[in-house]
Image (spheres, grey):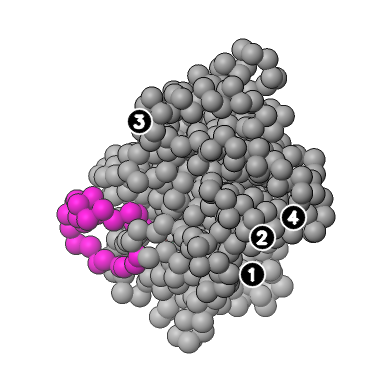
Amino acid sequence: MICVPITAGKKKEALHAIERSCQIADFIELRMDLIGGGRLTELISTARNSFSLIKIIVTCRKKEEATPAGGSAGMGIKGAGKKTIDRKIALLKEAIELGADFVDIELTEGRAAIKELQTFCAKHGGKTKIIISYHNLKKTPALTKLKEIFHQCAKVKPAVVKIVTLANTAEDNLVTLSLIPYARKHSPEIISLCMGDKGRVSRAIAPLLGNYLSFVTMEPEGKSAPGQFTVYEMKQINELFKGERTSPLAPVLSIRTPPQNYILLGDPVRQSLSPLMHNAALKEMGIEGNYSAFCVHDLVGAIQGMRAMNIRGASVTIPFKVAVMEYLDDVDNDALKIGAVNTIINSKGRLTGYNTDWLGLILTLQEAMPIKDKTIVIIGAGGTARAAAYGIMKEGGFPIIANRTPEKGKILSGTLNCPFYSIAEIGKIKAECLINTTPVGMYPHKDKSPVKALALGGYKYVMDVIYNPLKTKLLKDAEKQGCHIFSGLDMFVHQGAEQIRLWMGVEPPRALMKKVILERLTKIE
Ligand code: NAP
């Protein structure tokens, strides 16, 4: 079973992490030594409201046994004084009163503290179980020593014994792994693994031997201990070892995945490649669900339907990116500033709008060139041009707007406080990069370009947001002029991947998403 530790330093981030983790994990662990702010009652009720069957572990690791990775802005439990232990026991008692499923207490806190907690649990109906844990942040002791430690933990009759040590060598993995079948012959459940980069082997193999829980992180930067896998990596490992469990008693490594359905709202949507890309990603990530395109004539009705049918998220495309904003409950700051939404998250009926077009474009640009201090000409003054200009400015670059209709172009350049040129003047501008954000040159009008070929010679980089065809006339002309060129394909993949990150909180399989789109486009061409 999968457990995601919640370690965010700020309350808002912690609540968000809880909501996302509850959608995918069997357990969450509230690391109260790392979570800064946020009362336990609010954290627990957020988890229960997100998924009523989620199992909650409350932990308040003391500083000596807490790993350096993960957040550090929390209250922290430092020292071993009586007052510190009292504070910690009070917090764990509060967790018991609030109905946490498990509280975790270190063996080194002593028999008296553990006994006090057990008595308190029993008084409250015994719903909350105790995990006794041992952490060695310096090394992995020999197996005989670990067995001794296991018996010391097991003696106080907890529900689970957790033993985590640092792997200094690959062989250390064998020691913690060997403890699992040994411990399983005795009554409590066991969690035994190594941390650190050299300990990743134990994290991969331990579930096959019957380790009670696998600790994983939603995102690479959110690790609560070094060596932790992401949910997605663990899912891949699970796939790899399918059917390889050595013990029939070993619990199947599960990642809870209730059906998750997503939609695309637009008109027209028939040609959209988003369903192909998103469904390939869902399948690869082992998430049960579907992404379907809806040609929408009644936007209000579509939004009501999204709430009623508990659709987890939506992509929004032409012509609704601006219009949809007034029907949402919240709009994220970036999307507000851009003035367009291309992504909606449905969190228990509350719809929030985001924009990932700007991120898709910036991630693509960054793969090719530095943006800071560079002048970049944007052809167009529509939604994509606004997203591009916003991202470029955010990254410290200088946009210039060039548009067919001067009035519209000047309105945008005035808002951004940047220069405006007519399209005919593009050859005269001194800039590093040119980006086309108009539909000119898109299939089936493949012989059209918004700019004359000779105007491109002064640009080092030329990008087209169009990805069908992969090489537009603009890009072909630019290539002949010696420019580095890049199509809208990577932007399309990145904006879609960022949607998945928002909906599911996991890193999507970008390479696979690009592959399926590339295959389809190559076939079309
Ligand atoms: P939009 O808001 O309608 O804006 C279109 C812009 O293109 C306007 O500034 C318009 O100029 C200009 N334009 C249209 N036809 C033109 C023509 N014949 N000659 C010169 N300029 C023309 O559209 P959008 O949402 O920004 O989308 C623009 C393009 O970006 C679409 O092709 C879309 O598929 C693509 N896109 C790609 C990605 C990706 O991931 N790769 C993501 C988003 C969008 P006026 O002001 O003169 O009307």
Instruction: Please say whether residue 93 is one of the residues in the magenta stretch.
Output: no
In the visual, does 480 lie left or right of 198? left
Of residues 423 and 317, the one nearer the viewer is 317
Q: Is mark 4 within 8 Å of ligand 1?
A: no
Disc 2 and disc 3 in contact, CB within 8 angstroms: no
Q: Is mark 1 within 8 Å of ligand 1?
A: no
Disc 4 and disc 2 in contact, CB within 8 angstroms: no
Q: Residues within 10 Å of mark 1 (few under 14, many from 20)?
A: many
The residue carrying mark 4 is: 175
Compared to residue 498, the image places residue 467 above or below, namely below
In the visual, does 492 lie left or right of 141? left
- Find residue 32 and name its label: none
Does residue 363 appear anywhere in the picture?
no
Farthest residue to the right: give it: 169
Q: Earlier in the sequence, mark 4 or mark 3?
A: 3
Of residues 347 and 387, the one nearer the viewer is 347
Task: Kindly identify the amino acid type of the residue bearing the numbered disc 3.
Answer: Gly
In the visual, does 219 lie left or right of 266? right
Does residue 129 appear anywhere in the picture?
yes
- Find residue 485 and name its label: 1
Of residues 190 and 169, the one nearer the viewer is 190
| Number of marks drawn | 4
Q: Which residues are magenta?
A: 289-315
Task: Kindly identify the amino acid type of the residue bearing the numbered disc 4.
Answer: Val
Tell me the mark number nearer the camera, choosing from 1 and 2.
2
